[in-house]
Image (spheres, helix red, strand yellow):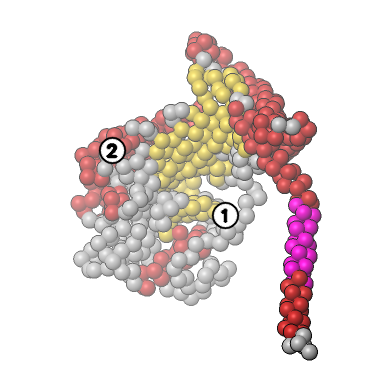
Amino acid sequence: MYDRPLMPGLRRRLALASARIGAWAAQRRFLGVVLGTYARVSTRLRRPVQVVGLAGLAAGGAWLGMFLGQTAAPVGPVDTTMRLVPSWDGESKVSLPPLGTLELDTHDGPVQIQVSVDAINPVAAKRLVEDPQALRGLEPEIVDDVRTGIYATATKGLITGTLGAMTVTLIVMRRRIPTLIAGGGAAVAILTVLSVAGATLDPRAVAEPKYTGLLASAPSLVGNAQDLAESFGAYSDELVRLVGSVSELYDVTNTLPATSASDDEIRVLHVSDLHLGEHAWDIIGSVTRQYSIDVIVDSGDITDHGLPAENYFLQPIRNLGVPYVWVRGNHDSLITEKAMRALPNVVVLDGKVKTVKGIRFLGAGDPRFTPAWRRVVPESDTRAVANQAFALAKVAKNSFPAVDAIVFHDSAGATFFDGHASLLLTGHGHEHLARVLPKGSRLMQEGTTGGAGMRALKYEEPQPVALSVLYLDRSTRELRAWDQITLGGLGLTSAQIERHQVKPDEEAEPPPSPIPTPTGSVPETPVSSPTVSLDPSSPSPSSPSLSSPQPDGR
């Protein structure tokens, strides 16, 4: 009788305890499942993680071993050090301290051949000086030395890379089996890399070296922009000396088939956009002498404002000693053109085919006159360039024999010239550009040989001095190869010479078309369109007088 009130409370407590026990058991089961799953996953991942870690140790050790496994190899009269280092780009790099480096795109494998020239062997050098006949046997000797050095470096790289992988693995894991596995894997990987490099070897790459050099004394030589004017003479002299030294070095280290015989080629120096850059003449003169240039082609903008006071800048042309082919740029006036015609070795292209050194040139001056103090380019001026190019292309089309080279200031004219001459020489863009156009013509747009002149001071980055040496076949007047020369811009004294050979399988690219054109291309039958007079004696419709406010161009 007295126990009945207690029964409901007891039942509730028992039910709550039972629920708690059930929840606890469920948690234990869930925890057990989680821990069991973790254990199984850990067991399964343990081996892949170990494999990845072992591979990483082996790769790092092999890289270190290959890097340290350098080989001392004499190559002709110089002593060199060769080594193999991992690299996604492949290639071979020759270090020529303190002058710079020579890069050769010899292969595609993930390994780079690094060669450092350490010293000149005085005994071998003396033998070459005393016995000029020894030079005849120098080339095969150098080839054998390089081949022997590369084989020795590859063998040593294989051994040191394998030992490096084993050493690093043994230090970290302290187990014999993983160490042996790492060494075997590294040896197989290195052999595979060397096989890929050998399979992708391109012997023609030695004909297209890229030289990059830097003068260590440049900061002390030139200083900052404030004292640039005072140091400009020293800067110009040093830049000329540098390009001469680099050219000599480049000539010694390069064996280009296209330039092995000077009697069957014509050497053309392409310059453009001097913009009153005084140092340009010293550089042009140095390259002309160094490369035995036959003819210089200037694609315009030799001045900045086209004023009579600027004609003094043209006088060094008479001292270059070779023909100077020129077209008027948009910064050059008819006054500039008249002064150029007065120079004895200048050939002004004016819409007629002119033969210079066996090359049939065709060109015409830019119909615009946009000196540096003008600011806006009207639509009529840009369309005048297209009309001028269209008219010039019709002259080229009707010319017999065919025109070899068309010289025009603005590359926009290439749209019309394509197919009417094998070589198109332009400027205006202040940037080097070389491409094959859809109809087979090769466009060569030069950068600014004057580094954009003294106006370069207003730019945050100096514009490089750019010019190119073109090698033409004397019989066909076709381009065979060219050297792209780039020198440090205002205040810098670096030099880079890059060799390019014409390849028959080059892919065609569309020409640059920054301006409106009457038709987009030269049609087979001429269409009715306005043309600009090719007679430089009469001002073009879009070449106003110097006093009228007009635009700015490059």
Q: Does residue 4 appear to the left or right of 362 in the view shown?
A: right
Q: Nearer the viewer, residue 7 or 247?
A: 7
- The stretch in magenta equals 22-42
Q: Is any part of residue 107 visible from this angle? A: no
- Mark 1 lies on residue: 436
- Callout 1 secondary element: strand
Q: Residues within 10 Å of mark 1 (few under 14, many from 20)?
A: many
Which mark identifies residue 25? none
Q: Is any part of residue 228 visible from this angle? A: yes
Q: Quadrant of residue 532?
A: bottom left
Q: Amino acid at mark 2?
A: Val
- Callout 2 secondary element: helix
Q: Residue at left 37%, top 61%?
A: 366
Of the 4 image quadrants, the one containing the N terminus is bottom right
Q: Does residue 500 appear to the left or right of 63 in the view shown?
A: left
Q: Nearer the viewer, residue 60 or 521?
A: 60
Question: Magenta includes 27?
Answer: yes
Q: Nearer the viewer, mark 2 or mark 1?
A: 2
- Mark 2 lies on residue: 222
Q: Is residue 164 above or below residue 534?
A: above
Q: Residue at left 61%, top 40%?
A: 87
Query: Residue 428 placed where, x, y %?
Result: 39, 56
Of the 4 image quadrants, the one containing the C terminus is bottom left
- Magenta stretch, main secondary structure, is helix
Q: Quadrant of residue 418?
A: bottom right
